[in-house]
Image (cartoon, rainbow, N blue to C red):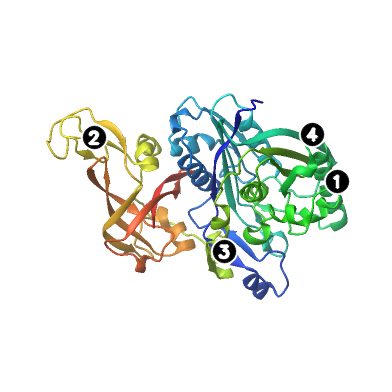
Amino acid sequence: MSSNRGIVATGVYVPRHRLTRDEIEAAWGTSTQVSRAAVPAADEDTLTMAVAAGRDALSESDVATTDIGHVAIATTTPPLEEGEFAPQAAAALGLADDCRLETSTQSTAVGADALRSAATADVPALAVVADAPEGDPAAVGQRVGAGAAAFLFADGGDVTLVDMATRSRDAPGVRFRERGSETVAEPNITTYEREVIRDLVAASVEALDVDHDAVTGVSLYQPTPDIPHRIARSLPYDGEAVGRGTLIDDVGDAGTATTALGLLAALDSSAPDSVTVAGFFGSGATATALAFEIREPIKTDVAEAVDGGRDVSYTTALRERGTLGQTDVSGGGAHVSLPSWQRTVPQRYRLVAGQCPDCGAIAFPPEGACPRCHERVAFTDVELSRTGEIVAVTTIGQGGAPPEFVELQRRDGSFAVAIVENTTKGESAQFPVQLTDCDPQTVSVGDRVVGQFRRIYSAEGVTRYGLKFTPE
């Protein structure tokens, strides 16, 4: 590994909906193991969260988007059981067509694989760890969360991966999801689970060739708040160092993303010339430890993302996750064929418009004659700003949307649509948008909004994605 290569920027995303301990305990009449758990909205999944975190990292860096040559994404909950989604993430982030893409799934240890892959690439590389597990509400489901963390590696980084170690053994059943199932299961053999996790993670960390006395921050596998501290009893780290990287109590069990988010937190509070350690674990069982040397601390903004959010009721959380109610869709809709949708992906994902080479006016979408000089020209591609102002808005109530939006309305209720105007390169453009993450009755003309990559609807077995807008 190049001694000059390291993390130059990070990104983070945590869904805004939060389910509190009080709500869970009131619903089940029993205690739960976390204080708050992040709940994805109806139009969020691991792809949208990965894009949000990745975009956050890219915006904090001087590395040009087109210079990113490698992307590694890790999750245990991809949008489809079979089917790549890394190309969609790359398209949404505006990366080059020849960017190398890697996707790691199936185990909560895969976050380490994505970090290793990006850290050892020979080009600027992005690692994104995103997850949103589901579980039996009576067991693991009481603490499941969601989130995403991104790490951008390039020359000149002040946080360098200096060593990694892996340990594994045949230990099935610690955490698993059967084929065809959407929910995580655990055997509830407490002693067995704790011993397997503790022994493997501790062994992988002990194998790191680093000065363990220099370690000031640690993020260890954390399916429950107590597990990292149990692992640390076999390691020369104090409770303060472990606490810096333990976030499950605030975001819930976000699968492989929990350790990655904890790594962000540990890096955020690191000191110069110190070491930060991350210990990932996956049932089966494998543990991988990573050691990062800190030349200069890096700001991650993870605390702001974790501390934010809006508390929701237990019923709202279940509805947003799609576990309440039934969808009965009938009749036709505003059908857009998959080929037609794909032709407009640059507009839907990144607001790619056309600028007239003669008069400079912007056309969105970039087709037809120039809206100002009315000449038929070859437009120059220009990416519109993702921020704008609402110039017209209305609410689509239940039954008022095409059938393909019935599932969204069942889970999230009525939504607002608007005409947004923004200014890019001194020229204004207007375009229609769907609003999200807001009460449609509270938005009005003049409000500032910003684009977010989200699920639109599913048709022909394929989920359509694109930009929606949220209030700033």
| Residue 202 shows up from this direction | yes
- Which residue is denoted by mark 1 in the rendering? 199
The residue sitting at 44% across, 61% down in the picture is 409
- Which residue is denoted by mark 2 in the rendering? 355
Q: Check the image and report above or below for 67 versus 289.
A: above
- Which residue is denoted by mark 3 in the rendering? 18
Q: Mark 2 is on which residue type?
A: Gln
Disc 3 packing (10 Å; few <14; some 14–19; many ≥20): many
Q: Give x and y (percent) for residue 465.
A: 44, 45
Q: Mark 3 is on which residue type?
A: Arg
Q: Give x and y (percent) for residue 256.
A: 67, 46
Q: Which mark is residue 209?
A: 4
The residue sitting at 73% across, 59% down in the picture is 225
Q: Mark 1 is on which residue type?
A: Asp
Kindly report which numbered mark, 4 or 1, lies closer to the viewer in this rendering: 4
Q: Nearer the viewer, residue 440 or 167?
A: 167
The residue sitting at 84% across, 41% down in the picture is 203
Disc 1 packing (10 Å; few <14; some 14–19; many ≥20): some
